[in-house]
């Protein structure tokens, strides 16, 4: 599912809301997650999962085309860990 499909689905399920308002809500939701992660904060959505930022140290890598060694700078990467409810639903397990 892509963002526009999510917006359309929410708008269809909530006919009392204007599509532009649903779009604003969805965009705000994702912007808040992005901003929190940019500040280095962890974002947890109970039952769904948690978004966090992991730091990767600088290292020496290899260019796969040429085999030449290259310096890879330290960087931050987004990380998502699924929640138990989502994992259970994906694996069809029931308690």
Image (spheres, helix red, strand yellow):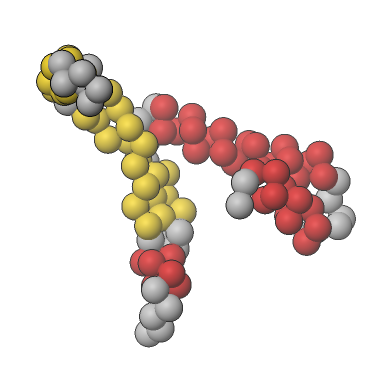
Seen at 50% across and 38% down, the residue is 33
**Closer-to-camera residue (42/68):** 68
In the rendered image, is residue 74 in sight?
no
Q: Quadrant of residue 9?
A: bottom right
**Left or right: residue 78 compared with residue 54:** right
Rendered location of residue 83, percent (x, y)? 38, 61
**Closer-to-camera residue (62/93):** 62
Q: Is residue 49 above or below residue 93?
A: above
Seen at 81% across and 58% down, the residue is 12
Seen at 34% across and 52% down, the residue is 81
**Left or right: residue 11 compared with residue 78:** right
Rendered location of residue 26, percent (x, y)? 66, 43
Q: Is residue 73 above or below residue 93?
A: above
| Quadrant in which the C terminus is drawn | bottom left
Rendered location of residue 72, percent (x, y)? 21, 18
Seen at 59% across and 41% down, the residue is 29
Q: How many marks?
A: 0
In the rendered image, is residue 25 in sight?
yes
């Amino acid at each position: 599912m892509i963002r526009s499909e999510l917006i359309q689905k929410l708008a269809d399920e909530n006919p009392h809301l204007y599509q532009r308002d649903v779009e604003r809500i969805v965009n705000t939701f994702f912007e808040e997650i992005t901003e929190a992660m940019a500040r280095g904060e962890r974002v947890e959505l109970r039952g769904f999962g948690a978004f966090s930022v992991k730091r990767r140290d600088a290292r020496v890598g290899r260019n796969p085309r040429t085999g030449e060694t290259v310096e890879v700078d330290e960087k931050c990467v987004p990380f998502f860990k699924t929640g138990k409810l989502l994992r259970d639903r994906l694996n069809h397990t029931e308690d």
